[in-house]
Image (tube, helix red, strand yellow):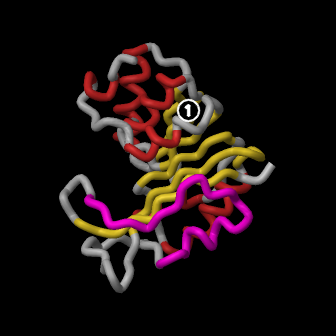
């Protein structure tokens, strides 16, 4: 597989997206908060049909430029504010990596509920989100952080393929705790 990410100066796909693709067969996927498209490009090369959404028009324009240049037919970049919680299609896989912590805390429940409602039976969610706990107070001033077990509680009834709340390092070197979840919607 040619590495489109490095060719276009993008970081590699998030390691959790790469891991999830060992479990999930190509399907209609949603990359929530896609930024410049590092995960969308990776998924498209594996055969997923990717809708890549982000509120930042510049990021979407950059991704659209790559899609046009590479003649990629299975990525649809769209400017969309995920805080609207108003998805208009159903997906077999929704990836939301290091995105939730940038949205209004009052919209998180609506966003997650909307994601769940627009996931096909047997479909998957991958979420990676910063936490703020007593053991690891969040050093970054994110609008939203998860508390211990909060994400698991929001996915009652789903099958957890992976769930952990481990310390990690952001790309800028900051140490903090992350909740990482790959869960499957009941069929």
Please report the residue visible at 49 percent of the width from the left and 31 percent of the height from the top. Answer: 43
Q: Residues within 10 Å of mark 1 (few under 14, many from 20)?
A: many
Along the viewing direction, whichever of 116 and 23 lies nearer the viewer? 23
Q: Secondary structure at mark 1?
A: strand
> Residue reaching furthest left?
173
Q: Position of residue 28 (x, y in %)?
A: 64, 33
Q: Is residue 111 left or right of residue 34?
A: right
> Residue reaching furthest right?
187
Image height of 160 relative to 24, above or below: below
Can you tell which quarter of the image residue 176 is in?
Answer: bottom left
On whether residue 171 falls in the magenta region, the answer is no
The residue that disc 1 covers is 50
Please report the residue visible at 42 percent of the width from the left and 72 percent of the height from the top. Answer: 145
Q: Position of residue 174 (x, y in %)?
A: 21, 64
Along the viewing direction, whichever of 150 and 80 lies nearer the viewer? 150
Along the viewing direction, whichever of 133 and 116 lies nearer the viewer? 133
Boundaries of the magenta span: 148-169
> Residue reaching furthest bottom?
134
Image height of 17 relative to 145, above or below: above
Can you tell which quarter of the image residue 82 is in?
Answer: bottom right
Please report the residue visible at 38 percent of the width from the left and 66 percent of the height from the top. Answer: 166
Q: Is residue 60 left or right of residue 183?
A: left
Q: Is residue 144 left or right of residue 9?
A: right
Can you tell which quarter of the image residue 27 is in?
Answer: top right
On whether residue 166 falls in the magenta region, the answer is yes
Q: Position of residue 157 (x, y in %)?
A: 74, 64
Please report the residue visible at 40 percent of the width from the left and 18 percent of the height from the top. Answer: 1
């Amino acid at each position: 597989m040619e590495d489109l990410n490095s060719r276009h100066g993008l970081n590699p796909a998030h390691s959790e997206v790469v891991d999830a693709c060992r479990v999930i067969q190509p399907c209609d996927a949603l990359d929530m908060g896609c930024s410049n498209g590092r995960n969308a490009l990776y998924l498209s090369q594996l055969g997923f049909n990717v809708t890549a959404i982000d509120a930042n028009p510049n990021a979407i324009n950059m991704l659209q430029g790559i899609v046009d240049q590479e003649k990629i037919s299975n990525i649809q970049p769209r400017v969309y504010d995920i805080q609207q919680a108003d998805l208009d299609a159903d997906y077999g896989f929704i990836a939301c990596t290091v995105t939730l912590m940038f949205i209004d805390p009052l919209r998180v429940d609506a966003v997650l509920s909307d994601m769940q409602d627009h996931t096909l039976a047997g479909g998957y969610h991958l979420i990676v989100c910063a936490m703020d706990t007593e053991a690891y107070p969040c050093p970054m001033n994110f609008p939203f952080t998860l508390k211990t077990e909060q994400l698991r509680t929001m996915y009652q009834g789903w099958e957890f393929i992976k769930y952990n709340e481990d310390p990690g390092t952001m790309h800028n070197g900051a140490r903090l705790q992350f909740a990482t979840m790959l869960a499957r919607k009941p069929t």
